[in-house]
Amino acid sequence: MISRKFLFSRLSLILAVFVLFSVAAPAQTFDAVKKQVRTHMLSNGMKFIVLERHDAPVAAFHVYADVGSANESYGITGISHILEHMAFKGTTTVGTKDFAAESKVLDELDAAYTEMRQEETRVNPDQAKLAQLKAKFTDLEKKAKDFVINNEYFDMMMREGDAGVNAYTSNDATQYINYLPSNRLEFWMAMTSDRFLNPIFREFFKERDVIQEERRLGVETQPTGKLMEDFMAVAFKAHPYHHEVVGHMSDLQAITRKDVEDYFKKFYSPSNLTVGIVGDVKAAEVFKLAETYFSRVPSGPRPEPVRTKEPEQWGERRVAVSAKSQPFLLIGYHVPDARNKDSRAIEALANILGQGRSSRLYTTLVKDKKIAAMVQAMSGFPSDKFPNLFAVIAMPAAGKTAAECQAAIEEELEKIKKDAVTEDELTKFKRSTIKSALAQLRSNPNMAALLTYADVVLGDYGKAFDQIDEIKALTAEDIKRVANQYLVKTNRTIGEIVTEK
């Protein structure tokens, strides 16, 4: 359920909105669609954004929690992702056979774990005592499991027709998704409000072990996973983009259920949650039911924003990972966040430079010089709420080196800095972006995701619509300017996998 980047490209989603309504409803103006969106803020600070679409009897539900790995501090990295897993474990009434009895066992289990950890971390642990504590802990885990109704939340949602129950964690957010028949609106309100009002993080230690295995498979046994982790730690020396969403193994092994409960209280207050609902619903009914079900969730202060800003980079940085693997090259340049006026031009630069088989880098490195098997450029890496990276990745072809690929990449960058992109390339970028957006399912879930993202990250759901004018106004000179401003040697980090013989 981890997503290194937001599930859909921000730009593609924005254009999907534009194309969807200009094609499906030509009589409507773009401004008219924007005016159809309705919002409502509960007294506890929780915001609801609704767009009525009555073409099919279904609705998408998207809960955007404004918390991701960038909000984590040392000692609890990976906790945002753990909490995402825990959110499916049920409540005081869902997922349990007898919560009153279960809660007592869970308290005993937490106490046993604390005692066991204290003994483990002593300078000279008493091994006999430690073995007894581990046995006690294992017995309590089994006892707690007897109260669990496995996957009851999933089963209940699917019985009601949920075709899209899911969740994912990124550097910037944790998001919860449902897609139900529209006549199950009140059912969703009851179930989801209960998740935020009465969460119980049962089977915590079991799920924590699962996430540790995710880390082993995704990072520690994968050469590119190792490179990515080391690269981000070097590229971001201060900002919390420097650690992986999955977290550090030592933190995953030490985080407690109490840590997760405290994190939930801090970051899952209603004032930090935004809900997008798109489909065959009536906004007035949504807001009325929201008052009934979600107003009962106690309010709390909005969490303090991330304090740390990545300082200016003073010179090129390099990182290398040795592995029994083919070579791999990763170059990252620091660029501004999604709200910055240059973000549109940076996206266009990434597209023209290295997205698709007709891009400059693919044409030069793969087709013409045949020094790379794969090459790609991207913006908003690893995420875009905060200043991030413009990244280029390349996999050298057999017998070729990362150095050859880097030299060819730099050559293409210099061409854009000197001569700019052509008008044909810029036009193709705009048209191809619209085409790719059309190729995606123009669905209610896409729209719900877009509205919540725009409201939280861009500052207003209306920004999703307003940015179309910025894209239309983009010029070749804009792209040339950002290339010269940001893609400079002192602003970059270079990472590579060095093949072990």
Image (cartoon, helix red, strand yellow):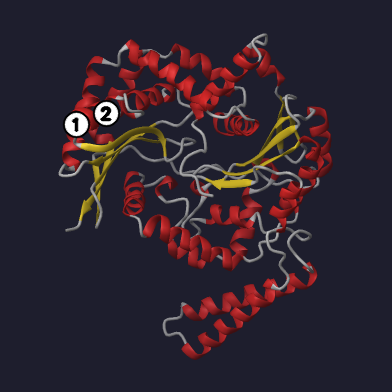
Label 2: how many residues lie within 10 Å, few (<14), some (14-19) or many (20+)?
A: many
433, above or below 142, in the image: above
Disc 2, SS:
helix
Q: In the drawing, does residue 372 fall left or right of residue 195?
A: left
**Residue 443, horizontal then vertical, whole percent:** 62, 30
Say whether disc 1 or disc 2 marks the residue closer to the N-terminus: 2
Q: In the drawing, does residue 434 fall left or right of residue 419?
A: right
Q: Please name the residue shown 30% across and 24% down the image.
A: 483
Comparing 362 with 4, the one in front is 362
**Residue 400, horizontal then vertical, whole percent:** 16, 42
31, above or below 193, in the image: above
**Residue 158, horizontal then vertical, whole percent:** 71, 49
Name the residue carrying label 2.
361
Q: CA distance from mark 1 to mark 2?
A: 8 Å
Q: Residue furthest top?
A: 27
Location of the C terminus (image quadrant): bottom left
Comparing 257 with 302, the one in front is 257
Task: Give the residue type at disc 2.
Answer: Leu
Q: How many marks?
A: 2
Q: Please name the residue shown 54% across and 50% down the image.
A: 1
**Residue 346, horizontal then vertical, whole percent:** 38, 25
Task: Give the residue type at disc 1.
Answer: Ala
Q: Is residue 294 visible?
A: no
| Label 1–label 2 contact, CB within 8 A | yes
Name the residue carrying label 1.
408
Q: Please name the residue shown 66% across and 65% down the image.
A: 202
Q: Please name the residue shown 60% across and 14% down the image.
A: 22
Q: In the drawing, does residue 309 fall left or right of residue 422?
A: right
Comparing 315 with 421, the one in front is 421
